[in-house]
Image (cartoon, coloured by chain):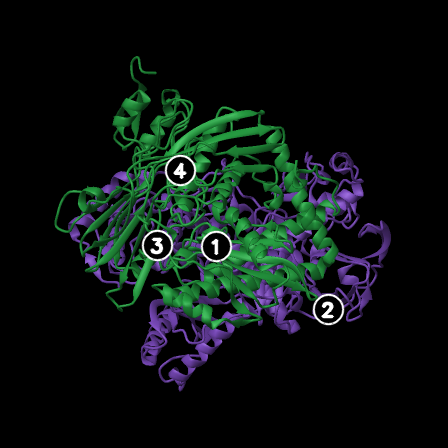
Amino acid sequence: MTAYRIGIDTGGTFTDLVRFDITTGELFSLKVSSSPQEPLQAFIGSLKDSDVPLEGIEGLVHGTTVVTNALITRSGSKVGFICTTGYEDTAYIQRVNRQFLYDLTWDKPTPLLRSRRHCIGVNERVNAKGQVVVPLVLAEIDRVCREIEDGEFEALAVCFLFSYLNTDHERQLAAALRERFSDIPVSVSHEIAPIWREYERSSTVIADAFVKPLIQRYVLSLKAGLLDCGFTKPWSMMKSNGGLMDADAAALNPIQLAMSGPAGGAVASQRISQLLGLDNVVTIDVGGTSADVGLLLNGQITYTTEYEIEWGIPASIPLIDIKTIGAGGGSIAFINTGGFLQVGPQSAGSVPGPICYGCGGTSVTITDANLHLRRLNSAYFNGGKLRLNESLINAGLDDLAGRLDMTPTQLALAVVDIANENMANAIRMVSIEKGHDPRHFALLAFGGAGPLHGAAIAKKLGIPTVVVPPYPGGFCALGLLMGDLRVDKVWTQALRSDRVQPDEVVARFDQIASAAADELHQQGFPGEPTFEYSINMRYLGQNYEMEVAVPALRSGSGVNAASQLCAAYSAFHAKHHSMYQYTMDDAVIEMVSFKVIAIGPIAHPQISNATAAEGESSTVRDVIFGAEGPIPCTIIRRRSMPVNQPISGPMIVEEEGSTTVVEPGMVVTRNEYDILILEVNP
Amino acid sequence: MTATDAPPTGLKVDPVTLTVIDNYLATTCREMGIAMMRTAYSPMFNESLDFSCVMFDRFGRMISQAEFCPSQMGTIKFTVEWMIDELGADVYKPGDVIIMNDPYRGSGHIPEHTLLKAVFYEGAIVAFVANCAHLAEPGAKAPGGLSGDATDIFQEGLRLPPLWLQREGVPQEDIWKIIFANHRTPKTTHGDLMAMMGSLNVAERRITSLIDRYGMETYQDATEDLMTIAERRMREEIRAIPDGEYTFKDVIEDDGVSDHPYTVRVRVVVDDDQITCDFTGSSEQAEGPMNGTFAVTASAVYNALMHLTDPTIPRNEGVYRPIHTVAPPGTIVNCEFPAPLVGGNTELSPRITDVIFGALANAIPDRVPASLGGTSCCFLFGGEHPDDGEFYSHFHFEGIGWGGRPRKDGNSQIIVINGNCRNTPVEVFESRYPIRVESYRLLEDSGGPGLNRGGLGIERILTMQTDSITVSAIFNRMTVDPFGLHGGKPGMNSGIYVRFADTLDWRTFTDAFGTESPSKFANLTLRRGDQVKIVAPGGGGWGDPMQRPIERVKADLDEGFITPAAAESLYGVTASQVADGTWNVTPAAGRR
């Protein structure tokens, strides 16, 4: 019998399914409309449409924007925030700075709590050395429980001061709460985010509690739906760090799903880059409303802990470092108060959508501009499922162009150019800001609109190569099938390079690695995990740290811990220099936290060999690439492209779900893995 | 009319490229800031972000800034102009870094150090990049630099004229040694100055790559155009303000040395597309450190007017061109050497924005908010750390309530208008300093009552965890209220109190230590177990509180932003609590 693995990626507009036939290696992808009101519908619907016999499904992985959307639209639960007495206002005080200067209409962000009354102080205190100053007594726990009872909360978030150093009080209270309120989910700060800075940790644990009832209902409903269809096997979800987690476990720690949607794209990007032997890659995933930009360094995904739900509301969990900006096909062009043309972040969404959808949209969008420039094929948008109406866009273009004293074509070019510049700026923020020169990177472009803009963005940044992977429209879903089970464990304790006992580091790595392995086994992983180790370091006195990978500092590993630590210090100096062009050679290095990642590998789909399909010839269309006006351009279906034959642009490569633009002067090659490689300056 | 007032001419660069370059420059300033935050040593930098990163063209005209401290970005214009003026335009070599902090050469006050670097392209200077940052320890008479009772500039720290900190990439050891020898925390100073230099490196790379991309001509034309656009838009904004003369005054309540108030008086003259803020009639310069230099005053004027005009105008030299400041020498708004002035930059600066807001409150009533809490609540401390015997020193400040606005309430707990700093997390604070923070909470009833309520202040209680610690303070709005507008009531005052170990009463520092001022003092010694209570003021209310819709009064009660007593006495309602802790509110008979 045929065995399949299925990846289902639910976005705001579309749900993508990728089916991987484990036996033959065959891949199949499918795009259906999402059903935000009734998420189960699109999920089960896509599964039914995929023609997979349920008993043939060996593995099912789900990526979803449900947590992201609940956070952004603030449609979460009534959370009780339980904290150290004196700190009840932490979520309201925040960090006291302003997002914008000179704007007296700006409002400080509101926490995810529904009311300041929902903050409950607990008489307990731990100091900066992790010592208990005020013990947590049973009578106090009782008092707090009674107060919580009166609050009728749907979820509870616990954050005590210095709990990243001493977890005792949080553990005591959490145990009592879980016993007393078995039907209310409890999120505890040292479990969710054992980091210092009480506001950031509080905000993170509140966010986790805020979405927990929702995600638990969501997972339950998907489980019930799958059960109805007769599917009983365990399935997993993709976390924000690109690792997989059993669905039940994910529901216990939902803030980990904040970037579940785009994470699949990052994972798939890593595999494609490995296939091509590319070390340094910028990824850009352009959809309908937003563009997600990420980075692969030395073939590795980059991570951050500085995610913000909105400005000033952090959720400090380790996640794939993806910068999202409001630039997608539906982004709206407008003239700002200063008379400048701007594009986005407002989007026409899928309803009413761009003007050319003919669903009542009246604002000029990037898609409209691309259609006017004839880079999009009105008869083959999403494989012809959606017919674009070119004549509708003229009035909107004329109006905007007239106000700027431009021709409609100049305007369309400007709209696309500004959008490209915005996306290029997002790339600068994730690359140059961190000391990486994009000219030494390749650009991997996917999502429905990524391949449409990739070439122009690369030109702006001096990036020499653009890569368009197979299935660019459903690439995130493909990535779901390329993830591994993963558990991260962190031990936070500051140790100084001049005083550290290497044995202590080894003992702690032993401890957290075995805890991580246990958790992986609990999620059903049968084998021996692989481990990655790292230490967060800074110069003693600095407040922000950099992660430095280290070898297995484990007992019995034969590694000389002392010399490996010295090597890690050198690596830290080098990393600091590459980012800021200086080092502090005589300074003591402080190791702040120690991390182990345990990975349970899973069989991944291989990208199959490409062949050129017969019988579809290319056509020619006049396309506008720049001020020189329309020029004849070859239009070809991707599957018809010859393999490993460089072709000079201009050329437009069309396929279901995406369109790749090859500008004049560029050269495109479809390689044996069905990957398109554009040389920007051949 | 001077040359810079000439009407703008046409632009040279197309609008798309201009947008791109403007965004690119602002992004670069932000990147400079991130580099500083991530590498600096003191919480003043890495948590509070008390610094600003700015770019200038080759003539020293500001071409870009980002969301840093407005007072620093206003003064750095003068700082950099002075440095280039004093040193000359052509003395810089690649890899040179110049340092300066002299307030009598355009710096805001001694703790704020400016680093300047010329950016070269094909052998010629194409830009200057600079950052200005508040070092926690400038070697003043009091740890933390803000001596509330200083009587001249020499008590306020080590004054550095423009000096080469680095020549062609080589650190100038002599200069570094002098600085280290004069600061109480040389390691921190070293780390922070290195962070500032790293940040300049980041900007240097970005500017050269911008020119690589667009060419020198487009880069130079674009920066010129952006200044023209900013000027043009600022003039349009000013033209929309009715012509006329508008006056207002407020006070700095005392100067820490003598116990009398100093008047800050402004006459705002709006003349077509230009605006002049004339401070003639303000008090003589203060004996204590509440003075501002001309740069501080002009910077505050820019800050006030930028808040009252379109916030999307590109922030560069052009914005400043139609704005003029008249500040008579020898007064509190333009002090003369060697007057002390360290508190002017934190305290006088918001008072200047206050009086300009007050003056224009009737001219543009739909834009002007009531007074913000108007003080940085500067609390300074230092000593030997009991854990390692090393000296530490810190400048602690608080957010305040902002004033009620024409259409909505003021924000609660936001840093004062002349800064854009963050608070220091308690977990960072306690890890660095031997002080425990017992509580940090919003203060109910601190927001000035109004149709649109002022934002709330906070109360913070600190317990000393060491046998000896030296403390100093500079506060304002302790005896003079943050004013309301259009019938709105004042916000609550600030306060700083001490409670000695094993005693019950909170006392003012005047009462406990005999200081001249309750709000400004220096070098007092506290002992283990002594407590300090800091109260940050609220913002003034806007409009008659009796007009505040009853459901908004209810919401304030439900959230605990006001007490039932205040609801009744100030908002004219009767309130009764219901079972779930929320409130039923009805108009009190004959009150509304």
Tell whether label 1 touches label 4 (CB within 8 Å). no
Q: Amino acid at mark 4?
A: Glu
**In this rendering, does residue A352 appear at all?**
no
Q: Residue at x 19, y 60 (%)?
A: B467
Of the pair A297 and B291, the residue shown nearer to us:
B291
Side of A358 relative to A326 (left or right): right
Judge whether residue B190 can be spotted in this image.
Answer: yes
Secondary element under disc 3, as helix, strand or loop, is helix
Residue highlighted by disc 2: A610
- Work out whether A378 lies above or below A284: above
Which SS class for mark 2? Answer: loop
Q: Position of residue B104 (x, y in %)?
A: 47, 51
Quadrant housing the N terminus of chain B: top right
Q: Residue at x 39, y 42 (%)?
A: B347
Is residue B250 positioned above or below B211 on the image? Answer: above
For the residues labelled 3 and 1, the Cα–Cα distance comes to: 44 Å
Q: Which chain is green?
A: B
Q: Label 1 is found on which chain of the structure?
A: A
Does residue B266 sit above or below A636 in this rendering? above
- Residue denoted by label 4: B284
Labels 4, 1: front one: 4
Q: Position of residue A302 (x, y in %)?
A: 53, 65
- Judged by depth in the image, the label closer to the viewer, 2 or 4, is 4
